[in-house]
Image (tube, rainbow, N blue to C red):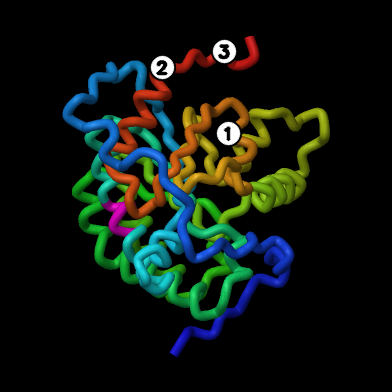
Amino acid sequence: MARRISRPTDSPALVHRETERATEPRPVVGSPDAAPTEAFSVPREELPRHVAIIMDGNRRWARSRGLNEMEGHVAGVEGIREIIRHAVRRGIEVLSLYAFSRENWARSDEEVGGLFLLVEKVIRNETDELRRQGARVRVLGRMEELPSETRVSIQEALDATAGGTRLQLNIAFNYSGRTELVDAARALVGQGLRSEEIDEDVVAGALYTAGLPDPDIVIRTGGDERLSNFLIWQAAYAEFYFSPILWPDFGPEAFDAALVEYASRQRRFGR
């Protein structure tokens, strides 16, 4: 039986839901094996410090194989595990993964409840591995709106990985870029700051990502080319990389291809 879902009172309306895609997947150009990991030769100083990923395509991946959508999410979790290991291998300092948006509340109770149960299971099973990888977990989003069981599992992972120093792993869960800005504004108002005391540094310090470098590159899998309300403040000068590969198939080789592309670009920051 699906878990009963209690949605936030200000969660996005159903009108925000994306139009359902046809069951037939769009053609995929290229392959997850297009850039062999063995050929990777980007100098460490040319790699991004902070990589952010919009993990899109789990449901289309499942449909294309005649599977139910939750099986696509399970396959997506397997992809997360490998990408985390590979990010550590490449020396990436910060990895931010968009796992559940506040817009996703508009999905069915069955899918939302299944996602929460999957998150709880994954956190229990993967916390020890994350600690071994030297990852420190931070959650970006409104934790207080999540079911109590999910909050407990997440908090246990946060506590268990607090000593990690090799990779800062940010999981954007129940996240919205606009909600993040609202929460930051509320925090600053609560501090009683005067308008002349508020500048970009002050706002950045009130965001969920306070103290972390902005993303150098935002990767989106699955073929769509938009931010979908992800890190909209922090990504102001990020490079964007859009891959047609569906998330469960986006492995280390595809990740390396994004890093190679990043290293080839000249970042001017408006100069």
- Front of the two marks 2 and 1: 2
Within 10 Å of disc 1 (Cα), the crowding (few <14, some 14-19, many 20+) is some
Of helix, strand and loop, which one carries label 2?
Answer: helix
Is residue 137 rendered magenta in the image? no
Measuring 55% from the left and 60% from the top, which residue is drawn there?
174
Q: Position of residue 133 (x, y in %)?
A: 22, 45
Check the image and name the residue furthest to the top. Answer: 271
Residue 153 appears anywhere in the view: yes
Q: Position of residue 30 (x, y in %)?
A: 36, 38
Among the 4 quarters of the image, the one containing residue 198: top right
Check residue 235 in the rendering and tell me which mark sits there, or answer none. 1
**Mark 3 vs mark 1: which is more N-terminal?**
1
Of helix, strand and loop, which one carries label 3?
Answer: loop
Q: Are marks 3 and 1 in contact (CB under 8 Å)?
A: no
> In the rendered structure, which segment of residues is drawn in magenta?
77-81
Check residue 264 in the rendering and tell me which mark sits there, or answer none. 2
Q: Amino acid at mark 2?
A: Ser
Q: CA distance from mark 2 to mark 1?
A: 19 Å
Measuring 31% from the left and 32% from the top, which residue is drawn there?
256
Q: Amino acid at mark 3?
A: Arg
In front of the other: 206 or 86: 86
In-image side of 229 versus 257 (left or right): right
User: Where is mark 3, residue-wise?
Assistant: 268
Q: Is residue 29 above or below residue 198?
A: below
Q: Amino acid at mark 1?
A: Ala
Within 10 Å of disc 3 (Cα), the crowding (few <14, some 14-19, many 20+) is few
Query: The N terminus lies in which quarter of the figure?
Result: bottom left
